[in-house]
Image (cartoon, rainbow, N blue to C red):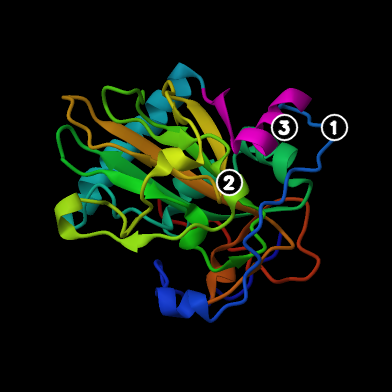
Amino acid sequence: MTSATTPQYKIVPDQDDLKRIERDLRFYPSTVTDPQILTPEQVEAFNQNGFVRPIPIFSAEEITGIRAYFDDLLARVTAAGGDSYSISSAHLKYGRVWDILTEPRIVAVVKDILGPNVVGWGSHFFCKMPRDGKQVAWHQDASYWPLTPTRALTVWLAIDDADVENACMRFIQGSHHFGHMTFRESNPGEHNVLNQTIENPEQFGQPVDDCLKAGECSIHSDLLLHGSEANESDRRRCGLTLRYAAADVRAHLGWNGKGVWVAGSDPSGHWANTPRPESD
């Protein structure tokens, strides 16, 4: 692999900037016919439902080690003034997160959906501390990403067990078929981790709880409507979101600078292919 200079970019683009970009916001179903890890039925489930879950990745021993690493990282970030939701684009800063983004077992699953040429470009810890009172309102990932076309997905890796009690993620099954949806800006009283809210999600499909054991992951389309309630339990709920796109997807606003070639190649050289950070 080779590396390129990383352009500057905004972590959360302004909506005005996004509106100036001509984006193709239609769902593109997977065309993979010979998946190596997923079954053909799971690939079809992704196309029809917009998600696949649960997918085992790490052993109990491995995820215990990853959790210990995150505990230390979180302590360092909060000591420096951050919070449990502020560890974003982490693969650009921390070698251990870069290793997870490029983990062959995860990449193999992603290839079964996106095909042979894949770029990993995002990594964000969503860590709900016990009784922190914050929800993630119903939203679509594509609303935040200056990418086109929408051949991108999220891998949600459970660092802790995630269930209904500690506010696991929820999907609206099949909602990715409706394209890009109208949203409103969230108000402070909603205590939303993000800044968008889509109303009346059940009009688009059936809610499904994304319950995962630590070390398992789910994958979902960037157009799938999803969110999670506030964690009112005494247990933490931490997940690492890993973002991937087909290499022929174009990134605007400098976001190609986040890219790492995780499978195949990027013949156009559009994505930066950032090297592993030296710091962990």
Image label count: 3
Which mark identifies residue 176? 2
**Which amino acid lies under the numbered mark 1 shown in the image of this protein?**
Asp
The image shows residue 165 at horizontal and vertical percentages of 26, 22
* Residue drawn at 43 percent across, 58 percent down: 89
**Which amino acid lies under the numbered mark 2 shown in the image of this protein?**
His
Q: Is residue 71 left or right of residue 103?
A: left
Marks 2, 3: nearer the viewer: 2
Check residue 48 for magenta coloring. yes
Marks 1, 3: nearer the viewer: 3
* Circle 1 crowding by C-alpha within 10 Å: few under 14, some 14–19, many from 20: few
Circle 3 is placed at which residue position?
A: 43
Q: Is residue 39 left or right of residue 158?
A: right
Check residue 133 for magenta coloring. no
| Foreground pick, 67 / 46 | 46
The image shows residue 2 at horizontal and vertical percentages of 70, 65
The image shows residue 118 at horizontal and vertical percentages of 70, 52
* Circle 2 crowding by C-alpha within 10 Å: few under 14, some 14–19, many from 20: many
| Residue 39 seen from this side | no
Q: Is residue 132 left or right of residue 23?
A: left
Q: Earlier in the sequence, mark 2 or mark 3?
A: 3
| Foreground pick, 49 / 270 | 49
Which mark identifies residue 195? none
Identify the image quadrant of the N terminus: bottom right
Q: Which residues are magenta?
A: 40-58
Q: Earlier in the sequence, mark 2 or mark 1?
A: 1
Circle 1 is placed at which residue position?
A: 34
* Residue drawn at 14 percent across, 54 percent down: 189
Mark 1 to mark 3 CA distance (whole Å): 10 Å
